Image (cartoon, rainbow, N blue to C red):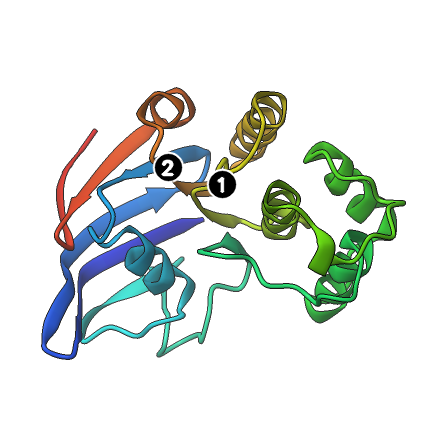
Amino acid sequence: MELVIKDYTKIIRKVTVLDQINLTLTGGKIYGLRGKNGSGKTMLMRAITGLIRPTAGYVAIDGKKIGKDIDFPQSVGALIENPSFIQEYSAMDNLKVLANLSGGIPEEDIRSILERVGLNAQESKPFGRFSLGMKQKLGIAAAVMGKPQLIILDEPINALDEYTVERIKELLLELRNEDRIILVACHDREELDYLSDVIIHIQEGRIVNDR
């Protein structure tokens, strides 16, 4: 997979939130997105997933422009801002609903990904009673379930204990080695440097450097 962002600009209420973004992301790499609060990280992630449309420029997946040739990336998993699930459903039941919407994922695979992120697939506790950490784990599980080609994670290790953070890092590195494009935003500079093959720095809606 190749993801191309070309001259992408987004203006909201006369404020330029993304300004002439140009990036090319390819499979088999983890891209770390670094920037202060309000720098445009979340907006860029929303642009890539097709949740917002550009004022100018475009995002293309393997040559297909989002909003023109396709509405959304055809194989994407995303955790952007606060994950939202059915309050009365368990972790397993919530993922089953999402799996059905995406064309079906074997129940065994759903159980496996729940265990990988540190949740019990047998637990009947409803989402509405989850701790912040449990909600975060379920959001990550939903994003990587089915191993989509494009995985976007906004602050995935927030509210997680050290043991779970290590498990998530192992999972992401495995997915990278399976040729996925992974984009991660994280305030923890050390963790982002450890995970990322490429660091992209965004400031005031502009890419100021990448390596």
Three-letter amino acid code at the position of disc 2: Cys
Work out whether residue 63 can be spotted. Answer: no
Horizontal side of 30 relative to 76 (left or right) equals left
Asked if the residue at tag 1 contacts the one at tag 2, i.e. Cβ–Cβ closer than 8 Å, the answer is yes
Tell me what residue is drawn at x 30 percent, y 75 percent: 53
Q: Which numbered disc, 2 or 1, marks the residue that appears first in the sequence?
A: 1
Tell me what residue is drawn at x 63 percent, y 49 percent: 135
Residue 102 in the image: state x and y as whole percent: 68, 66
Residue 40 in the image: state x and y as whole percent: 23, 54
* Image-quadrant location for residue 70: bottom left
Q: Nearer the viewer, residue 32 or 13?
A: 13
Horizontal side of 72 relative to 144 (left or right) equals left
Residue occupied by mark 1: 156
Q: Residue 3's mark?
A: none
Residue occupied by mark 2: 186
Tell me the element at label 2.
loop
Tell me what residue is drawn at x 75 percent, y 39 percent: 119
Cα gap from disc 2 to disc 1, whole angstroms:
7 Å
Q: Nearer the viewer, residue 22 or 199?
A: 199
Q: How many numbered marks, from 0 up?
A: 2
* Image-quadrant location for residue 4: bottom left
Q: Is 85 drawn above or below residue 133 in the view shown?
A: below
